[in-house]
Image (spheres, rainbow, N blue to C red):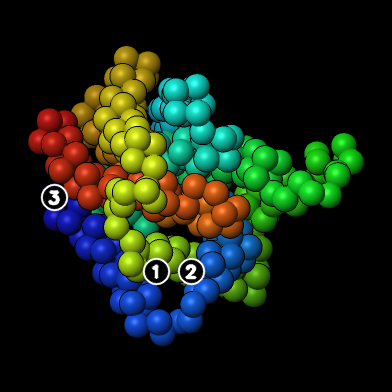
Amino acid sequence: MSGVISGFTVIFIVVGLGFILGRTGSLGEHASTTLARLVFFVCTPALLIHSLATSDLSVVFSPTLAVASIAALSVAVVYVPIARYWLHRPIPETVIGALSASYVNSVNLGLPIAIFVLDDASFIAPLLLFQIVFYSPVALATLDITALDSSERRSVWRTVAVPLRNPILIGGVIGLAVSLIGWRPPGAILEPLDMLGQASVPLALLTFGLTLTGATVFAKGESPRRDVVLASGLKMTVMPIVAFAVARWGFGMTGDELFAQVVIAALPTAQNVLVYATRYRRGEVLARDSALVTTVLSVPVIAVIALLLA
């Protein structure tokens, strides 16, 4: 429990600082957009390259990868038809909502919990691989095609090539390729990537805090309340249950290993979803409110999981 409290304290302090900066206007009127673009185009790609290039693939390609993948995709598959055919949401907002319901905060909260609660940071590596090499690129490719300005008629090749220029995808592919060939880049290359990558998490949290300035969760006429409730409910209930079922009966996990899989699934929505939403200017309030609601709810949810499975 001390690890859970420690991890959440880190998040709340940095988000609170972002909120204060937003309230005082210290970073200017367009700070949240500028920081979001910096995270999207520079810091997160650097984080992906460094993380994957220095990872042990035997740890990355483990049953945890399958559990995390199945849990996330199962929740997204449930969310998408409800959002499209019941709530009648456009594709970009549906994508952001699906990410809000299934994209785990694996770094700024996942790593502290993995270290202090699970006593093994390697549990996060497979989740990172799934989210940055597969999940993010697929979602961002969909957003590239459906959310960007289409006033200019694109050729078939340009439409296909747009997602391939996405910095998140490029960073993930480079990092994975370096790890696969077994090459260890020199320190002169790794150190600047590490420096930029370490800025990704705090900048994403600061961006989240900035967007909270003057904002009210579930604000009438602003927040898509049903979307937020749907995404948050799926994230904090269905995803941990699916992870438990897959880990327990699909892979025969028990004890600490089973506990770890369920805790990972119960982590809140990542602030990266808000960064993506801000980048494409679609579903920003949905991403912001879902991240805030799931962050608050994850404290009691993980506490209950710890009582039942730890």
Pick the residue in front: 14 or 94.
94
Rounded to the nearest whole Å, what is the CA distance between mark 1 and mark 2?
6 Å
- Find numbered disc 2 in the image and state the secondary structure of the residue it sits on: helix
Which residue corresponds to mark 2?
32
202 to 294, vertically: above or below: below
Query: Residue 245 occupies which quadrant of the picture?
Result: top left
Picture residue at 17% right of the left edge, 56% below the top: 5
**Residues at discs 2 and 3 in contact (Cβ within 8 Å):** no
Whole-percent x, y for residue 124 in the image: 40, 45
Position of residue 121 measured from the top left corner of the image (x, y, whole percent): 36, 50
Q: Quadrant of the C terminus?
A: top left
Crowdedness near tag 2: few (<14), some (14–19) or many (≥20) residues, C-alpha within 10 Å: many
**Residue for badge 3:** 1
Under circle 3, the secondary element is loop
Type of the residue with mark 1: Leu
Foreground label between 1 and 3: 1
Which label is found at residue 210?
1
Q: Is mark 1 on a helix, strand or loop?
A: helix
Q: Which of marks 1 and 3 is nearer the N terminus?
A: 3
**Alpha carbon of mark 1 to alpha carbon of mark 3: how far?**
29 Å
Mark 2 or 3 closer to N-term? 3
The amino acid sitting under disc 2 is Ser
Residue count near mark 3 (Cα–Cα under 10 Å), binned few <14, some 14–19, many ≥20: some
Q: Position of residue 156 (x, y in %)?
A: 87, 37
